[in-house]
Each structure stands twice: as C-alpha cells, then as structure tokens.
Image: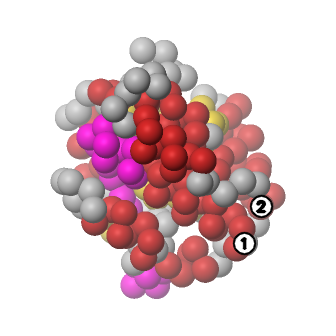
Amino acid sequence: MDAITLAAGQTALLVVDVQERLVAAMPSALATRMLASCELLVETASRFALPLFVTEHYPQGLGPTHPSLRLRLEATQPRPRVVEKTIFSAMGPPEIPRALAQSSVRSVIVVGMEAHVCVFQTARELVRRGYSAHVPFDAVASRDPDCRRVALELLGRHGVQVTTTETCVFDLLGDAKNVHFKALSRMVKELPMG
C-alpha cells in the first residue's frame, strides 16, 4: 500500500488530547468543526473495527476528554483505553507504539490538539517510525490559527499526508455499495464547513 491510501485492515485512528479545557481555549468555530470531524472519524473507526487510541495530556490540569467525544468513544466496542501522558508526542507513552507494532497498521490518522504541539510531534514521530501519518486539517485545532496553519504546512512538507476528514472516510469506504456508506455519508453531510 502506498503512503496516501487508507485501507481498513491497515489503518488506525489516534485521538490526541481532545480535552475539555483545551477545547474551551480554541476559537469556537474551529473547535466545533474539529469535534464534529473527530466524532465522525471515531464512528468510522468503530464501523471498520480500526485500532483506536486516545490520549489525554495532563488530565489533572486540562480535564478529561470532551463530553461529546467521550460519549462517542464510550459507544465504541471495544471501548478504547485512554492513555494519560505528559510527553507531548502520543508516541511517547509505550502503550501506543507497542500496540501499533503488534498490529498490521501501516497508516495512522492523527486528530486532536494542539496541531502545532502534540499532533505535530505525534505525526512526526509516526513518520520517523515508518508509518504513513494522515492529519485531516479539519480534525485538528490550535488556539492560534496561524500556529495550526504553519504546523500543517511543515507536516505536509515532511512526509505527512495533510488531508480532510471526508477524504479519510471515503477512502476507507472505497465504494458506494459499502454497507457503511449510507450512515457515514449522512454524517459527512452534517459536518460544519469552514
């Protein structure tokens, strides 16, 4: 499989630090769009049984995962374990790299916050380790939109696939005859636009 293609049997989703206090610090429209995109990608991961990883950065200070996303995650079977961290890269805690290494995953969709810190360092580390990292621009946020823009530009120039939530969903679907097409395409139509 090439670096730009997502295949259900070889793709994981990594949700990085979508936490209550961090979401509250984001520009409102950006936070709304990011949450909706993350929720759609979690639903997609659930329907395709993709490995799903969730991190929380210093939850004592930044709070737990945002309630709307937490509800979507709790409906996922098996329910993903939340990995607490203080290292900025989600590849820092050993549980996630170990689980990825033991799987058939070649591509990882990385979503969350902040785009220029934890998402940036996570995607960079995934590429260093030989994975294809896909970062949907509409599923990541930073307090400063310029920081988000610069992070996405840097990642794109250094081997990360900067993409969209809709592109990820339809790449995994592959065919309008897919059993999940109707439900997921309905959710795609409900995504907020920029």
Mark 1 and 2 residues: CB-CB less than 8 Å, in contact? yes
Q: Mark 1 Cα within 10 Å, few/some/many (few <14, many 20+)?
A: some
List x then y, in percent, for residue 88: 49, 60
Mark 1 to mark 2 CA distance (whole Å): 8 Å
Q: Magenta stretch: give its range.
A: 42-63
Q: Residue 108 falls in which quadrant of the image? A: top left
Residue picked out by circle 1: 27
Judging depth in this view, the residue of 89 and 143 nearest the camera is: 143
The amino acid sitting under disc 2 is Pro
Residue at 55 percent of width and 59 percent of height: 36
Q: Residue 183 falls in which quadrant of the image? A: top left
List x then y, in percent, for residue 169: 49, 37
Residue 145, numbered label:
2
Q: Earlier in the sequence, mark 1 or mark 2?
A: 1
Residue 104 is one of the magenta-drawn residues: no
Judging depth in this view, the residue of 119 and 36 nearest the camera is: 36
57 relative position to 30: left or right: left
